[in-house]
Image (cartoon, rainbow, N blue to C red):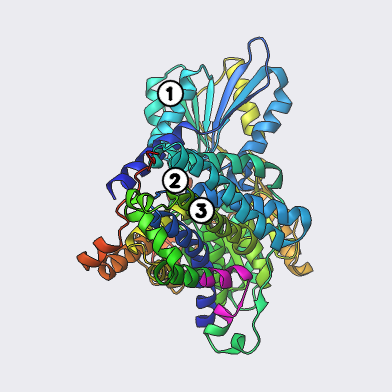
Amino acid sequence: MKTLTSSLLALGAAAALSMGVATTAQADDPIKAAFVYVGPVSDHGWSYAHDQARLAMEAELGDMVETTFLESVPEGADAVRALERLARTDHDIIFATSFGYMESVMEVAERFPDVAFEHATGYLSAENFANYNGHFYEGRYVLGKIAGLETEANTIGYIASYAIPEVISGINAFMLGAQSVNPDVEVKIIWVNTWYDPPREAEAANALIDQGADILVQHTDSTAMLQTAQERGVRGFGNDSDMGAFAPEAQLTAIVNNWAPYYIERVRAVADGSWETGSAMGSMESGMVQMAPFANMSDETRAVAEETMAGIIAGEVHPFTGPIFNQAGEEIVADGEVAPLDMILGMNFYIQGIDDAYPN
Amino acid sequence: MLLEGILVTIVGAATPIVLAAIGELVVERSGVLNLGVEGMMIMGAVVAFGVALGTGNPYLGVVAGALAGVGMSLLFGFFTVYLASNQVATGLALTLLGLGLAGLIGESFVGTPGVKLEAITIPLLASIPFIGPALFDRDILVYLSFAIVACVAYILFRTRVGLILRATGENAEAAHALGRDVRLIRMAAVAFGGACAGLGGAYLSLVLTAQWTEGMTAGRGWIALAIVVFATWLPWRALVGAYLFGGVIILQLHAQAFGIRVPPQAMTMLPYLATIIALVVLSRNQALMRRNTPAALGRAFVPDR
């Protein structure tokens, strides 16, 4: 076994070295922008959406920018190595696009004060380290409304990745939406502890369907859940990008992440010297949180979904509007008030009506 | 109904691991350690997907997936068996090569729904409650996985061919002295292992999820490797190990959906832990363990004449 163990370690190191690098576009003195993705760009989910934005940014800025990306970079020590390598190779701005990179970005940003670091979905920042995120829970609230109206079994299956605030607030926003139209709705949650493992996501989807769920939601990155839903004759929602092509009869809609405007803005800022640190928040209103076309649902549901979206965009509807109770029945947000942003971004409790223990 | 559903998905989770493990078991019984299972599996997955998509025939995909595994394994065999290169290093290189090459080949398949390998229902047997739908209303690869395990168990321990193969893995010099072509035997075993790993990969991209995604094997090749060791190189035990692993994976998903809450990290760890513990307990007989471990495992053989 000794050889096997040391071999596995060697493989890890070798895998880190072999992470693919791709460079495109040239100009006299372009801004060098780098992207680090947690999954393959071909996941058709999270990393795919970031890469689409990278391409859109390249198309928009042309010769002004030269981009590099590293895909499937594991969170942890490998991320530190990847970021360091990018910082050393004269990149002006580096986008790290997964929550789990946060500490790694902090570590590397301290050592390279002249490089601008950008981290998606985290909360740390520094002089040369900005973070950006989207109010994706707005989209999940709309999904909740649709699911609440469309479910016949009153049972929703939810495939979650990691118990981080972003995923927790997504589950809560979803349930608030569902409860607002269907007080009897129940949710079954499976944590798969991965962002991306298509066969595992399919197995989780099967388990949820076997336990009676007729609408599936995912906070993972592949299309496997929707494909399974289509095969088994239930419906569900795509995540991060429009996954309708994989499950034309099963996809109700999908939350589509549009990072392009932000990337264009930030790279422009580096070019004209105006870049500074900050915490940016995209939303449905700013266009970062979009929805794929509504399909496979009744006209009434569609109308409710469209109305909810319009309300969120106009600022009239906020998913986390009180009264909101936690599982113990304590009032967390008072009637008529809106949860403070800090609470949403650091959410660490389930709302009332989620019949499941909170994962620690 | 629920129990049936659980059994059906357990078979689905276990089959790719059974296929990869039984192939590697034969390879290791011949004295060769091929750590490239993950690489052969993923090549099997991408080639099977591509051929099934191109021809519209998933069975051609299955054959192509197996051949892709064979191709990869022959490359490995050429270096380790004929050029006597280090098996561990070559195996790891094969995994890296497979993962990269599969990504490259599969680039154009991304985002394309695939062709699914349909189930072949066995009349009567399929209507047995509980186990019928799980075992007798399945695709050809599930049936094949059982058939291969049975054949391997029979051939290894009940036939002359099996005896020669095991002799090669025990003591290559002695087998050579008896006039056996050690390198040819090892090449054949390596190729068989490649075919099985390729089939395991094909199962992922043609049955479990009819799609191609980069890195979709997600470590299943490594699980198969570990199961071979913990099963002390015994075919039926490897089958049990793979089913145990698949079973715990599916049961922990169901436990979660039922609202039985242990930390998700512990849940994810559970299949690995349970499989290792069970197989270690099964294999606690030291004498049996020693008898079953191929003594020449991982050692290159160079005939002196």
Residue behind mark 2:
A342
Mark 2 chain? A
Image coordinates for residue A23, horizontal then vertical, percent: 62, 24
10 Å crowding of disc 3: few (<14), some (14-19), many (20+): many
Distance in Å between CA atoms under marks 3 and 2 = 63 Å
Instruction: Give the structural element (helix, strand or loop) at label 1.
Output: loop
Instruction: Give the structural element (helix, strand or loop) at label 2.
Output: helix
Amino acid under disc 1: Glu
Image side of residue A206 versus residue B31, left or right: right
Please say whether residue B146 is one of the residues in the magenta stretch. yes
For the stretch drawn in magenta, what is the main secondary structure? Answer: helix
10 Å crowding of disc 1: few (<14), some (14-19), many (20+): some
Which residue appears at 46% of the width and 30% of the height? Answer: A82
State the image quarter where residue A233 is shown.
Answer: bottom right
Quarter of the figure with the C terminus of chain A: bottom left
State the image quarter where residue B120 is shown.
Answer: bottom right
Image coordinates for residue B261, horizontal then vertical, percent: 37, 68
- Whether labels 1 and 2 belong to a single chain: the reply is yes
Residue behind mark 1:
A127
Q: Residue furthest left?
A: B286
Which residue appears at 63% of the width and 15% of the height? Answer: A30
Which disc, if any, is residue B188? Answer: 3
Verify CB contact (< 8 Å) between mark 1 and mark 2: no
